[in-house]
Image: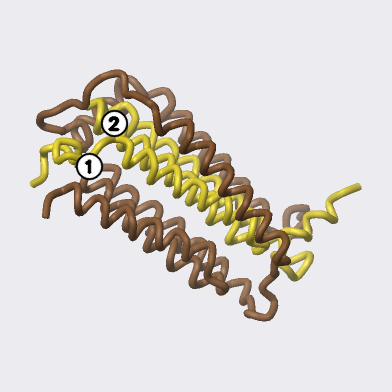
Amino acid sequence: MNLATIAIILGGLTIGSALMVILSKHPVRSVLYLVLTFFLITANYVLMNAQFIAIVNIIVYAGAIMVLFLFVLMLLNLRKENEPKTPLVGKVAAALAGGSLLIVFVAAIKDSVMLTEAVVGDNQQGLVQNLGHLLFTKYVLPFEVSSILFIAAMVGAVLLAKRESQILE
Amino acid sequence: MILSTIFESGLSIHFYLFLSTILFVIGVVGVMIRRNAIVLLMCIELMLNAVNLLLVAFSTYYGKGDAQVFVFFIMVVAAAEATVGLSILVMAYRNARSIDVSIFNKLKG
């Protein structure tokens, strides 16, 4: 069993669990399938030897963001009967629109030719050492700007979650 | 340790092009067929992850690390977006007792 076979199996599993995210009725199930999808995507990263991205994907996405989603979902205490439903016409229209989008994308990329050949050899650009060097030399300004974005998001989230009377005091 | 690329084992870059396209379209369809606002945010995360997967695939294909730095920044933006989006949802739920996206119709003047 070579790497290509593993990649194809992983791809199929990823698509299947992504479909379950949008098809399962209960939102908690959707969250759990999304966590599964993220782990499968992480497996794809490991296959491509993108070690730093694989670890960050598990920590940030499957760890932090999905726990946040699950936390909010359980905080709101939704019931199955309150789950909003889309009419059948809307579902059919959405499926048709999505299918058309897929056809357009596939038609656009199926004949594409890559300009250069794949780089063969040791594939080490995904290691922490090389990415860290790139991040703190070439991309150091976007890195610092993203910290400002984080502070803005943090202050915004705290401010939004408070009640108006608490803010005015 | 796997240090050889996956593309040496007979897989073309088109596999990842199609895989991430399909994942992206699943996210788009999810935004259209679901009314639950939290699931909508999750579908947006799915679309972002499809793009991340494609960026990492091209990074491996061309042997350059820059795309993986971009993936890192996409994750930063996704984390910020999820935080602010969820706090807006909590506030909307507090006012309307529902997370159906159609409650936002009431924002019309």
Hey, what amino acid is under mark 1? Met
SS of the residue under disc 2: helix
| Nearer the observer, A5 or A73 | A5
Q: Which residue is mark 2?
A: B59
Q: Position of residue B46 (x, y in %)?
A: 48, 51
Palette colour of chain A: brown
Q: Which chain is yellow?
A: B
Q: Neighbour class for label 1 at 10 Å: few (<14), some, many (≥20)? A: many
Q: Chain of mark 2?
A: B
Q: Position of residue B75 (x, y in %)?
A: 43, 43
Q: Is residue A155 left or right of residue B14?
A: right
Q: Which residue is mark 1?
A: A48
| Disc assigned to residue A167 | none
SS of the residue under disc 1: loop
For the residues bearing labels 1 and 2, Cβ distance under 8 angstroms: yes
Q: Position of residue B64 (x, y in %)?
A: 25, 25
Picture layout, residue A34 above or below residue A56: below
Q: Is residue A2 left or right of residue A80?
A: left
Same chain, marks 1 and 2?
no
